[in-house]
Image (cartoon, helix red, strand yellow):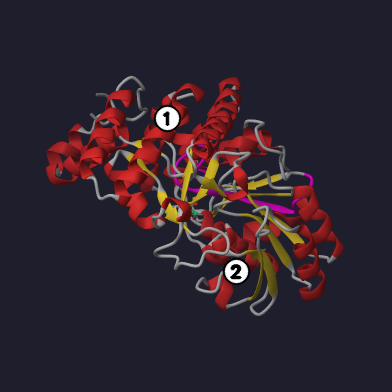
Amino acid sequence: MHVPPIPHLTAADPELARLVEGEAQRQHDKLRMIASENYVSEAVLEASGTVLTNKYSEGYAAKRYYEGQQFVDQIETLAIERAKSLFGVDHANVQPYSGSPANLAVYLAFLNPGDTVLGMSLPMGGHLTHGWSVSATGKWFNSVSYGVSRETGLIDFDEVRDLARRERPKVIFAGGTAIPRTIDFAAFAEIAHEVGAVLAADIAHIAGLIAGGAHPTPVGHADVITTTTHKTLRGPRGAMILSTEEHAKAIDRAVFPGLQGGPHNHTTAGIAVALREAAQPDFRDYAAQVVANAKALAAALVERGFDLISGGTDNHLILADLTSKGIGGKPAAKALDRAGIELNYNTVPYDTRKPFDPSGIRLGTPALTTRGLTEAQMPQVAVWMDEAVTAAVKEDDGTLDRIAGEVHDLLASYPMPGYKA
Ligand code: DSN
């Protein structure tokens, strides 16, 4: 049953309530390994589902375009102060609706259409909004991309430096969506500052690890930092932009009125709660455990013949090329889902297949760590993954269903925030 319970929804709209309950049970029964997903606490769920959704608040605290902000101003200020304290920054904007609008605000703050931006290419592990061709950021700006070395799977800083010197970008993005290794923000900063570019660190995937001390911080290196709030940080779906005082006004103006109208106050409240949780000592244990689990799982997968990009992981994320297993990422991901293991198919660097049918899978350990799994369970997870991939090649649905039952039985001992069996 969903927690908090949803009796009013059940009475008013049983059809929708059934779907919500179904999703809650699905999240309970599956080994959720999509690297960008997690389970928020019940406190975050409650804050996100409040009457704050009723309120318009265009503007910023004490400078709004609507009356009645006696409580919303305090809530947004609380979220801002908690973000500043957690990450040790001068300024925080907690209004971006999600990661893509947060990144768009960076463009609006620092570039004009046609200006040059340097970001990691999407198939190498970057994000659409770091200038990829199909995104507005690739269509409206002159986008140049860096990648990773074919041999090591690591960012090639010689390439980044050469591109920056030649193309003179106004903004350089560091970060992405499929980077299994530590991001060297100091190296990016050296290059950005040599060519007079603004360094934007997109820490969406690793914000929780940074807050919990399990990944080096970009603070002190990056001029501006964007992040979603719902990945390793374990808040509601939303985003923040952190910056030095120097860029505070430009960022605020870009978010509102540049790109957005009223902030989603119920989400701001959920972000405030998540930031408070992330400042507690046990969040450091969680962040360390996310990484320990990923390293243990990566080692067990390598032992079972999986070909991991860069050979392993330093963070929460693993990227595997399944070519040597004789299957594409998409059919493997679908088979794994049937086996109770939820992840996504993904391009791998230098992929010869198409993005909608790529060679790889991407997986991560934030959600299963929140459930309480540790290194002790990771070899079993690797065994299930290997068996499921082999079964997918043989189209052996019986094995997939057997694994799904075993996954279900294991997870019965690990409570899920937001659901009561
Ligand atoms: N969709 C996010 C992810 O899965 O990494 C990025 O936008």
The segment highlighted magenta reads 220-240
Q: Image point 33% across, 26% down: which residue?
A: 411
- CA gap between label 1 and label 2 equals 34 Å
Residue 220 at least partly seen: yes
For the residue carrying disc 2, how many other residues have a C-alpha within 10 Å: few (<14), some (14-19), or many (20+)? many
Secondary structure beneath dot 2 equals loop
Q: Is mark 2 within 8 Å of ligand 1?
A: no
266 in the magenta segment: no
Q: Image point 51% across, 33% down: which residue?
A: 300
The image position of residue 122, as x and y in percent, is 55, 63
Q: Which mark is residue 41?
A: 1
Please indicate whether residue 406 sits to the left or right of residue 260 in the image.
left
Please indicate whether residue 288 sits to the left or right of residue 419 in the image.
right
Image quadrant where one finds the C terminus: top left
The image position of residue 168, as x and y in percent, is 79, 72
Please indicate whether residue 137 sits to the left or right of residue 372 in the image.
right
Q: Which mark is residue 376?
A: none
228 in the magenta segment: yes
The image position of residue 98, as x and y in percent, is 49, 53
Residue that sits furthest to the bottom in the current view? 114
Comparing labels 1 and 2, the label whose residue is closer to the camera = 2
Viewer-nearest residue: 231 or 101: 231
For the residue carrying disc 1, how many other residues have a C-alpha within 10 Å: few (<14), some (14-19), or many (20+)? many
Please indicate whether residue 142 sits to the left or right of residue 79 in the image.
right
Q: In the picture shown, does residue 5 fall above or below 176?
A: above
